[in-house]
Amino acid sequence: MVHTLWVGLCCCLVLSCTPGDKGLPLVDDLPPPASLSDLFGSVLLKVDGSQAGLEALQEKALIGIFFSAGWCPACGAFTPQLLATYHELKESNKSFEVILVSFDDDAEGMLAYMRQHAMPWLAVPHGSAKATALTQRYDVRLIPTLIVIDRAGKTISMNGRGDIVAKGAGAYEDWLAASTGS
């Protein structure tokens, strides 16, 4: 069960079973996933609720895993920054995609949040085993959280949110330099 508590406008605290709570390895101890489908599964959702496969991630050098929820005030404040950065990177032909992992109460809440912000990216199905596994893998306790990985699944930044707040689209070059050279 996931419990939530609002903590100012800085972030929203998410109390749940985390890697440390269950003896699971922390991020630094995790081997890279065998494939992106190991991380995300084979089905992702579009803003209209339709399904898509992993083809949206094909050939993307960097992927942002965005842990967020529509009920979270800090998420509502950061989402427009992430969207602006995303659109700027796309306009500059940068190889970047975002995948949402929702902490909304249900699938309809997740889709409403995606529609409200016109999120152009995909989402892991709400409440799925993959969403839970991602939350545990990256030990997500606060939202919004943006984890940046490369196409091989290597963790590039555990603080993508801070990177974007500090540098906007300029964070991309730092992430790319830290990647496997993809």
Image (cartoon, grey):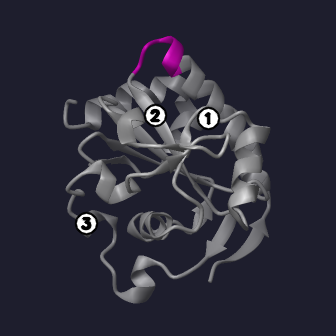
Q: Please indicate whether residue 135 sits to the left or right of residue 151 in the image.
A: right
**Element marked by disc 3:** loop
- Residue that label 2 marks: 97
Label 2 residue SS: strand
N-terminal label among 2 and 1: 1
- The disc at residue 82 is 1
How dense is the environment of label 3, judged by Cα within 10 Å: few (below 14), some, or many (20 and up)? Answer: few
Q: Position of residue 133 (x, y in %)?
A: 42, 69
The amino acid marked with disc number 3 is Leu
Residue drawn at x 74%, y 52% is 74
Which x, y percent locates residue 11?
A: 69, 58
Residue 73 tag number: none
**So how many labels did they put on this image?**
3
Earlier sequence position, callout 3 versus callout 2: 3
2 or 1: mark nearer the eye: 2
Residue under pointer 3: 30
The amino acid type, in three-letter code, at marker 2 is Glu
Relative height, residue 78 to residue 105 (above, below):
above
At label 1, counting other C-alpha atoms closer than 10 Å, the crowd grade (few under 14, some 14-19, many 20 or more) is many
Q: Which residues are magenta?
A: 89-94
Which quadrant would the N terminus be assigned to in this image?
bottom right
Q: Can residue 91 be seen at all in this image of the molecule?
A: yes
Q: Amino acid at mark 1?
A: Leu
